[in-house]
């Protein structure tokens, strides 16, 4: 059967009628089918939702011939008699699930079809997979893509105001202030949307408005609507771009689609928000008249309805926003017992927390709780994934930790705690000089970013809250200097900088982004002197983390800071070294560029 596949001529690919002809498609050679699937994954999944029994290889060919155009591909499938999955391929796919249980199911379908009639290549493929010489798309990536496409569909086709506001609770301020669009990523999509919505205005006018508002699409739309004297074209303009060009109707970028949904349903969204506020205002007034309002003992909001407050077992009441924020901070510090904010030592009920936080955060809590219980059992041979909280008991002869956490699924070398490099030993991994330099920089940046508990060696990163961290093992340490601390706050200062003490609160941009950048630039500066030739292909700006907009932190959670001193402490350097650093993005004064 393998010989038959090799003798098929190219002309048959215009309309293959058998699986053998599909296998012989020239673009499938040298794992080309895997590359095509990676490139066409979204449209493959969309077509399979409509034609569930279609041959996966045949589908890839049709998408490839139609330049991954979904509309043309679906039209082709209506006209032609499609090839369906073969029983032999389905059987092979089912067998492969035992070898690759964490693989993308559509990828397994493709493997089953491509190797259905070639045992020699099948065994070669299995050998590469089992020795980790070849990677493959994982189930986690597939599930993420399924969820992603479901979100795209909700925003584009099944829009409801309630679901939208869950994704974007404050759309007015969000789209007014955030720079969602950039000239390199969303410019064409933004222009195509404006072209479609304002089809009697010139493209030059639309481009000018985008540029005027720094490519913020919402501001550009508001400005065009408010223009008192628009200059219209004589006839409607044709659609911007050609039919295969990326535009707002085909993009799958969630953030951009949120903005499009907001612009298309703006009146409906604003009316709903106002009606909810009005109803709430009436309910508050009614409750006030009968003395039935409540106060949050954390933020001290004293106009809360009974349905808006929750209590600890001792009766201390808090609003849902404070409980959610407190839970996020606690979980960020790997705490699983969410204590009452009134320091009464009572814990919030997990059922109550589940009703307040989102599913992802609650699942994280449950995984942490499970990991804590397993560790407390002090089981011999217990190992923990280096990238999440998954734990498993392993025999001494096993060298790899296979994580079964669906959100991780990584393989860890048990000895060096890095991603698996089997069948090579830890000391056999060699890298090209430039890769080694980049890895060295990235490793230093990671070292600065991640904290490791001095007692149980658990890795963690703080997302919010103060700098006194409590590990799930119970030990406490300072997030800035990494030293153990007592249960009191004597190690920290707050409103006034003090020698030999660390700030109680810091902006995460300082302890994360700025400190990481400083560590990277120190290495770069050293290499410029010792081995400048290794830096010729290193773009520091592509390695550095993006600067984040500082959160609106309450005044009570802002400590006085000597920024350079804090950064020096975080990365373990002298403050003079930080003072002498040049080109630090996060420490540069914000100077407006002159207009030309």
Image: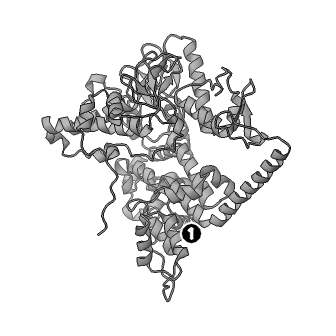
Residue 368 in percent (x, y) is at 57, 25
Identify the residue at horizontal 50%, vertical 43% (top origin).
141
Q: Quadrant of the C terminus?
A: bottom left
Q: Which residue is mark 1?
A: 79
Question: Looking at the rendering, which quadrant does residue 77 occupy?
Answer: bottom right
Q: Residue furthest right?
A: 290
Q: Is residue 425 visible?
A: no
Tell me where residue 272 appears, x and y as whole percent. 70, 59
Q: x%, y% of residue 53?
A: 59, 52
Numbered-mark total: 1
Camera-nearest residue between 586 and 267: 586
- The picture quadrant where one finds residue 355 is top right
> In the rendered view, would you say 168 is above or below 464?
below
The reply to whether residue 351 is in sight is yes
Q: Is 389 left, or right, of 525 in this rendering?
A: right
Residue at the spot x=82%, y=40% of the render? 292
Residue 41 in the image: x percent, y percent? 48, 52
State whether residue 502 is above or below residue 273.
Answer: above
- Rendered residue at 50%/16% (across/down): 475
Q: Is residue 516 above or below residue 550?
A: above
């Amino acid at each position: 059967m393998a010989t038959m596949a090799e003798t098929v001529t190219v002309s048959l690919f215009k309309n293959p009628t058998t699986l053998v002809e599909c296998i012989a498609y020239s673009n499938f050679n040298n794992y080309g089918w895997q590359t095509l699937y990676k490139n066409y994954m979204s449209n493959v999944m969309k077509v399979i939702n409509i034609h569930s029994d279609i041959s996966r290889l045949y589908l890839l060919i049709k998408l490839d011939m139609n330049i991954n155009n979904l509309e043309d591909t679906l039209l082709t499938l209506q006209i032609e008699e499609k090839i369906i999955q073969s029983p032999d391929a389905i059987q092979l796919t089912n067998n492969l699930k035992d070898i690759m249980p964490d693989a993308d199911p559509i990828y397994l379908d493709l493997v089953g079809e491509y190797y259905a009639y070639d045992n020699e290549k099948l065994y070669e493929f299995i050998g590469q997979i089992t020795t980790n010489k070849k990677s493959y798309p994982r189930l986690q990536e597939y599930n993420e893509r399924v969820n992603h496409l479901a979100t795209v569909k909700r925003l584009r086709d099944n829009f409801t105001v309630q679901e939208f506001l869950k994704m974007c609770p404050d759309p007015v301020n969000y789209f007014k202030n955030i720079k969602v669009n950039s000239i390199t990523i969303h410019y064409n999509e933004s222009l195509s949307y404006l072209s479609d919505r304002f089809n009697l205005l010139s493209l030059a006018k639309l481009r000018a408005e985008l540029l005027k508002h720094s490519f913020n699409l919402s501001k550009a739309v508001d400005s065009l609507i408010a223009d008192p004297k628009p200059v219209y074209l004589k006839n409607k303009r044709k659609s911007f771009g050609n039919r295969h060009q990326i535009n707002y109707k085909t993009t799958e970028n969630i953030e951009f689609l949120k903005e499009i949904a907001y612009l298309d349903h703006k009146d409906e969204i604003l009316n709903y928000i106002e009606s909810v506020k009005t109803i709430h205002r009436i309910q508050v007034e009614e409750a006030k008249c009968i003395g039935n309002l409540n106060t949050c003992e954390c933020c001290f909001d004293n106009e809360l309805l009974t349905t808006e407050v929750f209590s600890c077992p001792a009766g201390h009441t808090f609003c849902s926003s404070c409980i959610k924020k407190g839970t996020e901070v606690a979980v960020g510090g790997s705490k699983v017992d969410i204590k009452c904010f009134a320091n009464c030592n009572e814990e919030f009920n997990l059922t109550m927390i589940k009703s307040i936080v989102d599913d992802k955060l609650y699942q994280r809590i449950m995984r942490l709780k499970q990991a804590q219980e397993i560790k407390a059992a002090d089981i011999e041979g217990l190992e923990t994934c280096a990238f999440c909280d998954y734990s498993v008991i392993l025999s001494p002869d096993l060298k790899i930790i296979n994580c079964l956490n669906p959100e991780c699924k990584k393989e860890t070398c048990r000895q060096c705690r890095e991603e698996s490099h089997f069948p090579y030993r830890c000391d056999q991994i060699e890298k090209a000089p430039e890769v080694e330099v980049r890895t060295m920089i990235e490793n230093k940046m990671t070292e600065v970013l991640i904290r490791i508990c001095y007692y149980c060696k658990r890795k963690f990163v703080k997302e919010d809250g103060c700098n006194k961290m409590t590990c799930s093992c119970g030990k406490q340490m300072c997030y800035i200097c990494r030293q153990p601390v007592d249960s009191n706050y004597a190690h920290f200062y707050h409103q006034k900088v003090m020698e030999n003490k660390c700030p109680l609160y810091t902006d995460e941009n300082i302890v994360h982004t700025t400190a990481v950048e400083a560590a990277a630039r120190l290495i770069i500066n050293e290499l410029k002197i010792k081995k400048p030739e290794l830096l010729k292909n290193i773009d520091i700006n592509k390695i550095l983390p993006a600067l984040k907009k500082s959160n609106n932190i309450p005044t009570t959670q802002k400590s006085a800071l000597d920024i350079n001193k804090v950064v020096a402490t975080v990365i373990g350097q002298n403050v003079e070294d930080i003072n002498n650093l040049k080109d630090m993005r996060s420490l540069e004064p914000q100077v407006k560029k002159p207009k030309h």
